[in-house]
Image (tube, rainbow, N blue to C red):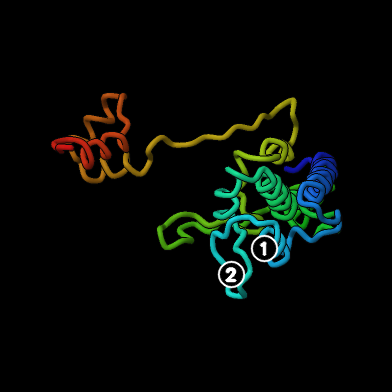
Amino acid sequence: YVDKEKLQELRKVVTARIAELQKELAAALGVSPLFDFGSNVELGRLLEKLGWECLGRQKNGVYQCADFELERWVKDHKEAAIIQEIRSCKVILNTFIGDSAETKGWSQYLTYHPEDGSYRMHPNFNAMGTESGRSRCSAPNMQNVPTHGVFAKEVKQCLTVPNKDDYYMLTLDFSALQMRLASIDSDDEVLCSLFKSGKADIHSKTAYGVFVKGKKY
């Protein structure tokens, strides 16, 4: 179930935020507000012209300016943080919220149900759909709903329930599910005893056994 009105309102908020950030970035870098910050080629040329340190070049010789480079630049160039936020906002807009024409994001998957006046998405789940045996979800992928970062909370609030008087939504996550299954399948005494104690942090125990226990530094 999707709150379409909230989705539309969030689209306006995110779009306005992108415009605000691009105006701020243009002023900070001394270029026109119409500068195409979405083009890595144009952005790379600009940053080189401004004297930012080179952290690698694309095949065409232009500065690399992907996430890796931005994460390093942000320590010395506050403008890099603005570029990061713009990109995050655009991912939220294009991948989740969608456009007004309903050709992107969740908007393109909304189905109106006249029986109750609701809008819903009907994603496809493919059990054992990956090489590792995990489930795969598509149209849309509801396994990558943002949890942290810019506008993540607001995006999740667009997902709703049939009736807020009778339903509420929650998320559940297993604690160390794979290791628990491994301990059951193998009947390993050490693993089983750790889980039965109720105080096990298996990954810390494993790291300690591999890197610390019995080692001299």
Picture quadrant where residue 52 is located = bottom right
Query: CA–CA distance between discs 2 and 1?
Result: 9 Å
Q: Quadrant of the C terminus?
A: top left
The residue sitting at 58% across, 74% down in the picture is 59
Could you tell me residue 119's position as x and y percent? Answer: 79, 46
Query: Circle 1: is it few (<14), some (14-19), or many (20+) Cα within 10 Å?
Result: many
Task: Label 1: state its secondary structure.
Answer: helix
Q: Quadrant of the N terminus?
A: top right
Residue extending farthest to the bottom is: 60
User: Between residues 170 and 82, which one lies in front from this camera angle?
Assistant: 82
Question: Label 1 belongs to which residue?
Answer: 44
Residue 181 got which mark?
none
The residue sitting at 75% across, 43% down in the picture is 2
Say whether marks 2 and 1 touch (CB < 8 Å): yes
Query: Circle 2: is it few (<14), some (14-19), or many (20+) Cα within 10 Å?
Result: few
Could you tell me residue 133's position as x and y percent? Answer: 41, 57
Image side of residue 200 versus residue 142, left or right: left
Q: Can residue 98 be spotted in the picture?
A: yes
Question: Label 2 belongs to which residue?
Answer: 58
Specify which label sits upstream in the sequence, 2 or 1: 1
Q: Can residue 15 be spotted in the picture?
A: no
Image side of residue 120 versus residue 138, left or right: right
Q: What residue type is labelled 2?
A: Gln
Picture quadrant where residue 94 is located = bottom right
The residue sitting at 74% across, 60% down in the picture is 38
User: Between residues 158 and 76, which one lies in front from this camera angle?
Assistant: 76
Could you tell me residue 201's position as x and y percent? Answer: 32, 31
